[in-house]
Amino acid sequence: MRNIEIRNARRVAVLAHGHRILVQNVTFEGTGGGAFEGWPDPAAGPGVRTALITQCSIKDVCQLNRQAAPIWLASFSRNNSPVHSDVAVTNCTFDTGPGSDLQLWDVDGGFVGNNTALRCSPLLDPSPFLDASNSGGTVQSGGNDVKAESNDSRLCMKQQQQQQQ
């Protein structure tokens, strides 16, 4: 998937399974779910393996109040064994929130580098830019420019929370 725009999608923009995935120079904006999500499913196939997500713009995604992240890989397994492998997220721009911009759970051989992110102030949203806490594998990170200083409600509250106030 290269050189396209995905705007105002109701749920997840890209739900991925399988091998050799390239997402390059894609604009994701205004989705209810994440920009790129990967979950293994017996009917749909294995986890994400050998994937490159690069030069993407990710803005105002994950607007629905649900468990998700702009880039989210998970297995929902209880044995902490990685099902996703060799996943790189590089040179992307994140302008979305609240919550982590990347949740790479159950990933072995992940790399997150040279990305730029504008995030909510940690006083209002203490979640990290990268959450690999449930990984059981290895995720490396470096060269990311994360600015966590905004108090903008667009970055600090989900859509459902805004409507209730």
Image: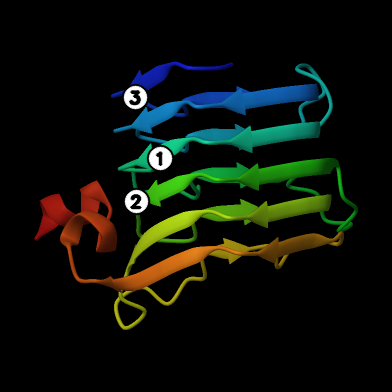
Label disc, if present, on residue 10 of the rendered structure: 3
Q: Amino acid at mark 2?
A: Thr
- Measured from the top left, where is residue 110 in percent x and y? 78, 51
Give the quadrant of residue 59: top left
Q: Amino acid at mark 3?
A: Arg
Residue 162, compared with residue 27, is above or below; it is below
Q: Amino acid at mark 1?
A: Ile
User: Quadrant of the image for the N terminus?
Assistant: top right
Give the quadrant of residue 144: bottom right
Element at label 1? strand
Numbered disc in front, either 3 or 2: 2
N-terminal label among 3 and 2: 3
- Measured from the top left, where is residue 118 in percent x and y? 35, 60
Distance from the alpha carbon under mark 1 to that under mark 3: 15 Å
Residue positioned 42% across, 77% down in the render: 126
Looking at the image, residue 105 sits to the left or right of residue 25; the answer is: right
* Crowd around label 3: few <14 · some 14–19 · many ≥20 (10 Å): few
Name the residue carrying label 2.
96
Pointer 2 and pointer 1: residues touching (CB < 8 Å)? yes
Numbered disc in front, either 1 or 3: 1
Does any portion of residue 135 appear in the rendered image? no
Residue positioned 74% across, 53% down in the render: 111
- Measured from the top left, where is residue 27 in percent x and y? 40, 28
Residue positioned 62% across, 35% down in the render: 53
Label disc, if present, on residue 58 of the rendered structure: 1
Label disc, if present, on residue 81 of the rendered structure: none
